Image (tube, rainbow, N blue to C red):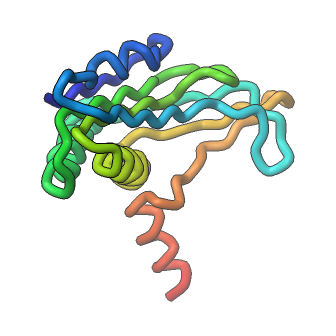
Amino acid sequence: MDHIKLTREVLSTGEVADAVTDPSCGAVSLFVGTTRNHFQGRQVVRLEYEAYEEMAEKEMLSLCKLAREKWNIKHIAIYHRLGVVPVLESSVIIAVSSTHRRESLEATSFLIDELKARVPIWKKEMYDDGGGDWKKNKECAWNKEEEMVKDA
């Protein structure tokens, strides 16, 4: 079963892990992405996320399907926070359960990489000086296309 959630509420690792825990599985792998307090020499005070929610949820479910085609996994949960995310709080939590660890570890890594590349969620870093920057995910397909045009 796949659990997808976009929310403005604080994310709970326990809730996400519980969503994928199954008695037939010997592994639950978690990825937790948190807001760090710095980036390229600047003090970060928070992140702000926006999403095209309907499309983001559809893409997240599509990623679950792709992961299931590659690995023998039982449950997947992808929770992403929107709005303001202060330093130390979680922006994204991904959990995967499987019979054996290798499948859940590989699927979790695949899911976070593909989420950053394909899902329409945008991040703005806000700094202690009051400034802010919208960040580009280097993995993002439309950013790669933009870079190819620049290089041409």
Corner quadrant of residue 88: top right
Q: On the picture, is 85 further left or further right than 145?
A: right
User: How far across and how far down the image is residue 147, in percent?
Assistant: 51, 73
Q: Quadrant of residue 101?
A: top left
Seen from the viewer's position, the closer of residues 99 and 106 is 99
Q: Is residue 68 left or right of residue 18?
A: left
In this view, 130 is above or below 15: below
State the quadrant of the N terminus.
top left
112 over 141 or under it: above or below: above
Residue 66 in the image: above or below residue 23: below
Q: How many marks?
A: 0
Rendered location of residue 61, percent (x, y): 19, 39
**Residue 100's spot in the image, x, y percent?**
27, 43
Q: Give the residue displayed 22% in from the left and 39% down from the top.
A: 99
The residue closer to the viewer here, 109 or 122, is 109
Q: Residue at x 32, y 16 (%)?
A: 18
Towards the viewer: 7 or 63: 63
User: Which residue appears at 78% of the width and 39% of the height?
Assistant: 38
Q: Is residue 120 left or right of residue 41?
A: left
Residue furthest toward the bottom? 152
Q: Which corner quadrant of the image does residue 27 belong to? A: top left
- Closest to the observer: 32 or 72? 72
Image height of 87 relative to 41, above or below: above
Q: What residue do we see at 45% from left, 24% from top?
A: 81
At which x and y percent is residue 84? 57, 20
